[in-house]
């Protein structure tokens, strides 16, 4: 699913990674999980913390703070994002819950991962960056 | 390998990290001294200083050093790698096997050595 301005009042799961708040469409956020000790992937960049097995699937765990460059906070909780091409766990130091998000939802940058983050937006009474999950998945699959 | 299964693996550690290779990829297990200065260390793929206590030699001559290894003759199902991680390790990642309650990344030895050869060598 892409994120556009017309979708600016849909429900999103709002969560924090480090000092930054993010929102993913509620329909993509399958669950909040506590992940076990991770298996590192050889050659993985720092933002890819590792993988874990969950219901027969190997789930990659991405630290959004390290990916975006805003810093990291150690946690074993993550928002599990389920897409048609696979799943992705995004670390979440705090989960605020499902909330409406409003804003212009323009890309926060012209290149890199910021293309797949939208804003400025507000959700759960906070400034949030809205994640386009499909775009993020494609970006990560091409070697972020 | 047969489809999504692998029969015979080398279960290894690179530093504290798990890594497995299909046994068919390995022709010889040597001491590091026999390949001094030539073999790559699997630890490099985890951002650690190079080092090894055993060297795996591919039939085509590529060598990769590991810290521990164990030969596992069991048949294991290969869990597919997500597209998010499949490109890592230079595309050497075949998937993951679940052995003794934990996941092991399963990589092709030759492609993995080529990946290490292109990575910063540090203290290799």
Image (cartoon, coloured by chain):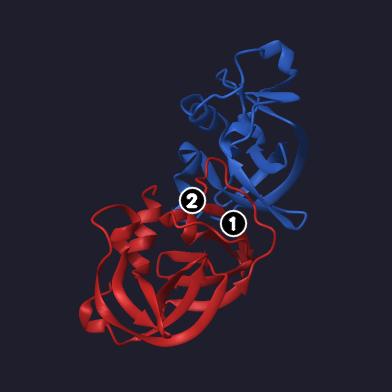
Report whether A69 appears left or right of B80: left
Q: Viewer-proximal residue, B65 or B77?
A: B65
Using the image, name the chain to which the residue with label 1 belongs: A
The answer, for residue A26, to whether it is visible in the render is no
Q: Of the numbered discs in the image, which one, if any, rests on residue B85?
A: 2
Report the chain shown in blue: B
Quadrant housing residue B8: top right
Query: Where in the figure is residue A17, as x and y percent of width and height?
Result: 51, 67
Q: Of the numbered discs in the image, which one, if any, rests on residue A51?
A: 1
Query: Where in the figure is residue A82, as x and y percent of width and height?
Result: 46, 72
Q: Tell me: residue B60, above or below residue A110.
A: above
| CA–CA distance in space, label 2 to label 1 | 9 Å
Chain A takes which shade in the image? red
Query: Where in the figure is residue A50, as x and y percent of width and height?
Result: 59, 54
Quadrant housing residue A123: bottom left
Mark 1 Cα shell of 10 Å, populated few (<14), some (14-19), many (≥20): many
Query: Where in the figure is residue B55, as x and y percent of width and height?
Result: 69, 23
> What secondary structure is found at the residue carrying circle 2?
helix
Q: Quadrant of the N terminus of chain A?
A: bottom left
Residues at discs 2 and 1 in contact (Cβ within 8 Å): yes
Quadrant housing residue A36: bottom right
Do the residues indicated by labels 2 and 1 lie within the same chain of the protein?
A: no
Report whether A135 appears left or right of A81: left
| Residue located 50% across and 85% down the image | A97
Q: Viewer-proximal residue, A28 or A11?
A: A11
């Amino acid at each position: 699913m892409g994120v556009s301005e017309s979708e600016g009042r849909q429900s999103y799961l709002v969560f924090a990674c480090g000092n930054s708040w993010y929102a993913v469409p509620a329909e993509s956020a399958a669950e909040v999980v506590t992940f076990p000790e991770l298996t590192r992937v050889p050659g993985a960049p720092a933002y890819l913390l590792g993988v874990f097995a969950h219901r027969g699937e190997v789930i990659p765990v991405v630290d959004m703070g390290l990916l975006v460059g805003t810093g990291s906070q150690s946690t074993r909780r993550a928002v599990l994002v389920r897409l048609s091409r696979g799943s992705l766990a995004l670390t979440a130091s705090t989960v605020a819950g499902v909330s409406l998000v409003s804003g212009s939802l323009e890309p926060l940058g012209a290149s890199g991962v910021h293309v797949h983050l939208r804003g400025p937006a507000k959700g759960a009474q906070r400034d949030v960056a809205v994640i386009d999950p499909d775009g993020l998945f494609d970006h990560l699959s091409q070697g972020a | 390998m047969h489809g999504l299964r692998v029969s015979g693996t080398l279960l290894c550690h690179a530093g504290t990290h798990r890594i497995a290779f299909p046994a068919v990829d390995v022709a010889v297990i040597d001491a590091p001294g026999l390949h001094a200065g030539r073999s790559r260390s699997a630890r490099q793929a985890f951002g650690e200083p190079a080092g090894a206590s055993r060297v795996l030699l591919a039939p085509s001559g590529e060598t990769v050093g590991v810290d521990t290894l164990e030969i596992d003759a069991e048949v294991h199902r290969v869990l597919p790698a997500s597209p998010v991680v499949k490109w890592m390790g230079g595309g050497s990642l075949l998937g993951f096997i679940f052995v003794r309650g934990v996941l092991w990344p399963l990589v092709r030895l030759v492609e993995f050595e080529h990946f290490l050869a292109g990575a910063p060598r540090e203290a290799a």
